[in-house]
């Protein structure tokens, strides 16, 4: 047992180690005590009138009306669910981290939850109501498929830590869009899915936990068998292979088992977020003090125990805060996501990230030769594309009109019908194009400044916090004015940006992690807000968060126009600075550019652009990623020509998405942002795949 | 690169073709001298809707009504007027259709939370009826450009039936069906009285009942409970039955949510009725049966559990409530 980890990090026998175990013992003891207390508290919580006194009566053999049934069919299943979910997620996270040697790997970052949720939603939308057991199978398959896609796409020989998180977050976002579409199209069939999507521990007897428990036990057992190989794997692939470990097979089996555990947890309670990330990370903190924990078997097992503690604590807190009755409608997963996401931010701060792990813009392909030599022609083509998209957007929708109608409208001789159609459609078309332009420019700026080709206001959590600000204003203030909405979104976005700058400390990988954490926390809080207000707000909120131009008025477009104009004006002067900033820190410094100030200026601009777009249209992801990329691939990396193309492409992308969303299921409508995600996710994943091949 | 050039020219040709095809118009331009045909000489009608807005119908009672919520759609239909448009047509048929089937063939105008402004404009209505939530603030102005938009919230948990009859009168005024409204409300009272007599005759007076709607998803079961402030419970109360669930719930609809163990608070002698729908599975059979708590609940042991209100809208108008009242008698006296 003790042979393998010693060479990994020889430790001098310092006197401190003798003093520390006592503190550690005390901490472990306190932890164990808390676990017991949490179990006890957990059993007393519930909607039935079975409290601690009644429990005691039952334990001592007394009779409480309905008491035994409540304990057996509701309290114990919920406790067991917490145990299974906590253990499975804790161990799954630890295993994923071990096989990838990536402290950020976890079920959340591999899309298991999103995949399972989508599978459940598809089945519900089809009107098939499955019993608990087939339902588990469906969620299971969805989870495994998503995880396989993420791991497959993000891994080549090795997995870059942030790339895995990125692939997982993006897949989660894309699958989430697909789920939103289904939730909107089938509101009745899927009515209870929204809350469940954030993970709820409520159990109907042992129906779900009974089949999951053996899976978890077998999964953990198999991982224990792999324990020694995993220990050796920590030495590095080459050393492990030299010591006779079949590296690829170990990794593959470890991944399958971890996903199996995570999927089992999802089937029991839905996606309970971030436990698989937090628990192993906490154990690793302990391992700094206690060498024994650096071995994989105790590491995996303790991660499971800590996972249980976290889940139980969250569930006890949740019901203590909201009361048992309204606790029914508030999913536990919201709380764990909130705690876990903030934890990810802290983790990102502590993490020592190896330099040069990220892909830089500089190393990416530099555009088509034809595009680079004929930038004007390309830009002209993009203008034509955008104009076509705008005209098509104006003519096509729920009801198709023709140019003659528009001409009648211009001359003010149109029928009321045409007048209403044109006047309700114009702001939508303009709004979608403007939002696309704003977000694309924001994405390009963030990417140049952070030198991170995968940065995007959506991925960095700026959109989500801006959205949270707007939804908070929408829910909390009785009649929300347009300007309040904008400033609420701006406030939210600014908080995220500030956190990114302060906590990210200029490191691109750390910044992305902080952003993903902030985005997840904002998402969880938004869910909480919606679930806690009224269920009828749900559709409205999903629509809004999906990035819809529905009901966009000219007044809402003004902030976008202003910020976009400001952005274009600034960027025409700083395009050359951006060209240098995207290379490295020293080149621009040598050439006399105030790097810090320039970075701040462009980040601030990006936040304002994102907030304006979010306040008007809602949360739209991927534009800030897809548009700059496509532009860079066509026309090259010079910002003087790349930025205009980015803006044009972004505007066209969202305008076309909006057109599709308005017409495919008319008279119903899909939010533009959802359509963008559906188009953007494949592009992003393809990009990740391609970048893998490049290496 | 050649492919780019080819793509550009293809795009150009396509754009030109599109442009050519898009010329022409779908509506003839209007002349200034053109007056709407039709001989609406009735006096203008002015009412104040539940949002406090003053609504004026210049040509008298509305002839072409679009309803954005099912309750309003049901009330208009019950008053004998054909709608020209209704939100989520299929949903209406499934959830309200058994109580008050739609008259004529109204068009679908989109989701209840997101009506299509364009579809509504095409119908050229002279009145748009909605609940507070079904007229999104953002499109209120656009809808108002088409026709007067009247918000009529029919639910108020503090006085569900009184509020409903007030709102029926309000809607009736706008479509010139006051007499039909009087008749409809009298019919509701008569139905309740008649059914109260049946309940009394069956010796069921004072029996606690509750309408529920259990939802199962994954391993989790949540039950929506229709509390004392709901219209369905008010009808049951008026029939001499009592409320089996006393959580007041939300302010408008009186709804609350609970899990299975919370059902232990339902009185032993209660009738547990659950909302039935042809397009959904039986929630009791699929998710509640077999649970130890459920199986041990006195009213389950007693067999006082039954599906009810199939195709009857629990948040609807007098038509739905009459159907619910009849259904109650049938369900309670069947076993």
Image (spheres, coloured by chain):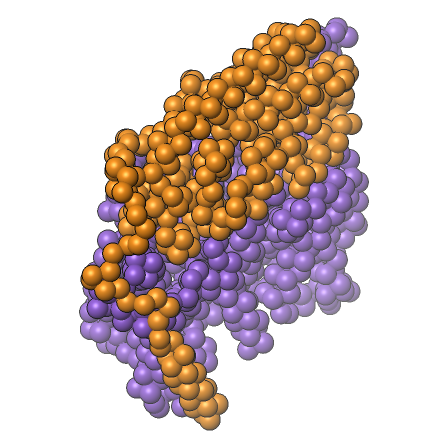
Most foreground residue, B200 or A154? B200
Q: Residue A310 in the image: x percent, y percent?
A: 58, 35
Q: Residue A503 in the image: x percent, y percent?
A: 37, 50
Residue A300 visible in rendering: no
- What's the residue at 28%, 78% (across, down)? A640
- What's the residue at 24%, 60% (across, down)? B34
How many numbered badges does the structure rendering display? Answer: 0
Most foreground residue, A157 or B249? B249
Q: Residue A509 in the image: x percent, y percent?
A: 45, 60
Q: Please indicate whether residue A162 sits to the left or right of residue A118 in the image.
A: left
Q: Please indicate whether residue A463 sits to the left or right of residue B189 in the image.
A: left
**Where on the picture, by quarter, is residue B68?**
top left
- What's the residue at 43%, 23% (across, down)? B182
**Where on the picture, by quarter, is residue B235?**
top right
Q: Please indicate whether residue A487 sits to the left or right of residue A2 in the image.
A: left
Most foreground residue, B112 or B300? B112
Q: Residue A65 in the image: x percent, y percent?
A: 71, 9
Query: In the displayed structure, would residue A568 be above or below residue B161?
Result: below
Task: Give the drawing colour for chain A.
Answer: purple
Query: In the displayed structure, would residue A531 be above or below residue A98?
Result: above
Q: Quadrant of the C terminus of chain A?
A: bottom right
Query: In the displayed structure, would residue A367 be above or below residue A515?
Result: below
Task: Give the drawing colour for chain B.
Answer: orange
Q: Please indicate whether residue A611 sits to the left or right of residue A519 in the image.
A: left
- What's the residue at 43%, 42% (across, down)? B67
Of all residues shown, which one is farthest toward the bottom? Answer: B2
Residue B22 visible in rendering: yes
């Amino acid at each position: 047992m003790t042979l393998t980890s010693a060479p990994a990090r020889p430790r001098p026998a310092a006197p401190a180690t003798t003093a520390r175990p006592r503190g550690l013992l005390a901490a472990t003891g306190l932890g164990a005590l808390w676990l017991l207390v949490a179990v006890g508290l957990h059993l007393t919580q519930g909607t039935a009138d079975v409290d601690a006194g009644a429990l005691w009566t039952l334990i001592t053999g007394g009779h409480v009306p309905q008491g035994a049934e409540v304990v057996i069919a509701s309290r114990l299943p919920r406790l067991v669910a917490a145990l299974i979910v906590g253990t499975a997620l804790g161990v799954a996270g630890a295993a994923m981290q071990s096989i990838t040697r990536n402290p950020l790997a976890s079920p959340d970052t591999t899309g298991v939850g999103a995949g399972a949720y989508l599978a459940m939603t598809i089945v519900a939308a089809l009107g098939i109501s499955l019993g608990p057991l087939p339902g588990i199978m469906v969620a299971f398959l969805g989870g495994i498929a998503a995880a396989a896609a993420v791991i497959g796409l993000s891994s080549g020989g090795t997995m870059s830590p942030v790339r895995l998180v990125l692939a997982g977050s993006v897949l989660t976002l894309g699958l989430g869009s697909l789920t939103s579409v289904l939730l909107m199209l089938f509101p009745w069939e899927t009515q209870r899915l929204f809350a469940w999507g954030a993970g709820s521990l409520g159990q109907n007897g042992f129906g779900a936990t009974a089949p999951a428990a053996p899976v978890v036990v077998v999964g953990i057992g198999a991982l224990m068998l792999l324990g020694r190989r995993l220990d050796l794997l920590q030495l590095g692939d080459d050393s492990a292979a030299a010591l006779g470990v079949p590296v690829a097979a170990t990794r593959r089996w470890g991944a399958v088992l971890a996903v199996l555990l995570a999927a089992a947890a999802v089937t029991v309670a839905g996606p309970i977020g971030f436990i698989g990330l937090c628990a192993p990370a906490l154990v690793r903190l302990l391992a700094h003090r206690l060498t024994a924990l650096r071995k994989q078997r105790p590491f995996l097992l303790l991660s499971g125990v800590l996972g249980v503690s976290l889940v139980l604590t969250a569930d006890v807190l949740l019901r203590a805060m909201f009361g048992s009755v309204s606790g029914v409608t508030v999913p536990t997963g919201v709380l764990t996501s909130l705690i876990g996401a903030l934890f990810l931010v802290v983790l990102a701060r502590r993490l020592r990230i190896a330099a040069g792990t990220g892909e830089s813009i500089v190393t990416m392909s530099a555009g088509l030769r034809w595009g680079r030599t004929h930038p004007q022609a390309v830009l002209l083509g993009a203008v034509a594309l955008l104009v076509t998209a705008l005209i098509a957007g104006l003519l096509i929708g729920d009801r198709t009109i023709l140019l003659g109608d528009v001409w009648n409208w211009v001359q003010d001789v149109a029928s009321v019908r045409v007048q209403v159609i044109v006047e309700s459609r114009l702001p939508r078309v303009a709004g979608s194009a403007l939002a696309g332009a704003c977000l694309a420019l924001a994405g390009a700026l963030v990417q140049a400044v952070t030198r991170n080709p995968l940065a995007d206001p959506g991925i960095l959590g700026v959109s989500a916090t801006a959205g949270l600000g707007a939804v908070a204003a929408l829910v909390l203030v009785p009649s929300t004015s347009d300007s309040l909405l904008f400033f609420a979104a701006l406030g939210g976005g600014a908080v995220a940006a500030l956190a990114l700058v302060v906590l990210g400390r200029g490191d691109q990988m750390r910044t992305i992690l902080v952003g993903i954490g902030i985005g997840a926390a904002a998402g969880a809080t938004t869910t909480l807000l919606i679930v806690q207000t009224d269920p009828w707000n749900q559709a409205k909120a999903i629509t809004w968060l999906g990035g819809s131009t529905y009901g966009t008025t000219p007044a809402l477009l003004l902030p976008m126009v202003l910020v976009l104009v400001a952005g274009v004006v600034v960027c025409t002067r700083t395009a050359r600075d951006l060209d240098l900033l995207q290379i490295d820190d020293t080149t621009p410094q040598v050439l006399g550019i105030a790097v810090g100030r320039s970075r701040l200026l462009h980040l601030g601009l990006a936040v304002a652009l994102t907030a304006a777009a979010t306040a008007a249209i809602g949360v739209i992801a991927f534009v800030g990623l897809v548009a700059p990329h496509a532009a860079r691939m066509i026309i090259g990396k010079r910002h003087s020509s790349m930025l205009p193309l980015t803006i044009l492409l972004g505007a066209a992308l969202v305008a076309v998405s909006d057109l599709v969303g308005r017409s495919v299921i008319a008279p119903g409508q899909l939010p533009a942002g959802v359509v963008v995600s559906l188009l953007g996710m494949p592009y992003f994943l393809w990009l990740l795949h391609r970048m893998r091949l490049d290496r | 690169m050649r492919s780019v050039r080819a793509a550009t020219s293809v795009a150009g040709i396509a754009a030109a073709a599109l442009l050519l095809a898009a010329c022409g118009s779908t509506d003839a331009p209007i002349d200034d001298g053109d007056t709407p045909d039709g001989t609406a000489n009735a006096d203008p009608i002015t009412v104040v809707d539940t949002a406090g807005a003053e609504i004026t119908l210049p040509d008298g009672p509305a002839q072409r009504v679009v309803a954005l919520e099912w309750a309003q759609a049901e009330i208009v239909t019950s008053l004998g007027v054909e709608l020209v448009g209704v939100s989520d047509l299929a949903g209406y048929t499934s959830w309200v259709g058994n109580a008050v089937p739609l008259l004529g063939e109204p068009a679908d105008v989109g989701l209840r939370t997101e009506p299509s402004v364009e579809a509504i404009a095409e119908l050229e209505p002279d009145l748009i009826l909605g609940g507070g939530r079904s007229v999104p603030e953002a499109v209120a102005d656009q809808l108002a450009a088409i026709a007067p938009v009247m918000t009529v919230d029919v639910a108020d948990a503090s006085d569900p039936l009184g509020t409903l009859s007030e709102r029926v009168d309000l809607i009736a005024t706008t479509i010139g069906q006051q007499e039909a409204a009087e008749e409809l409300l009298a019919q509701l009272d008569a139905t309740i009285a008649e059914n109260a007599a049946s309940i009394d005759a069956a010796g069921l007076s004072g029996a606690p009942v509750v309408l529920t709607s259990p939802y199962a998803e994954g391993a989790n079961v949540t039950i929506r409970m229709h509390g004392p402030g709901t219209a369905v419970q008010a009808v049951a109360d008026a029939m001499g039955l009592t409320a089996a669930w006393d959580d007041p719930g939300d302010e408008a609809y009186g709804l609350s949510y609970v899990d299975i163990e919370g059902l232990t608070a339902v009185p032993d002698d209660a009738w547990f009725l659950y909302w039935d729908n042809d397009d959904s599975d039986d929630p009791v059979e699929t998710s509640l049966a077999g649970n130890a708590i459920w199986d041990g609940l006195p009213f389950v042991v007693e067999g006082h559990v039954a599906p009810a209100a199939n195709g009857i809208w629990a948040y609807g108008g007098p038509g739905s409530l009459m159907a619910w009242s009849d259904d109650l008698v049938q369900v309670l006296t069947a076993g």
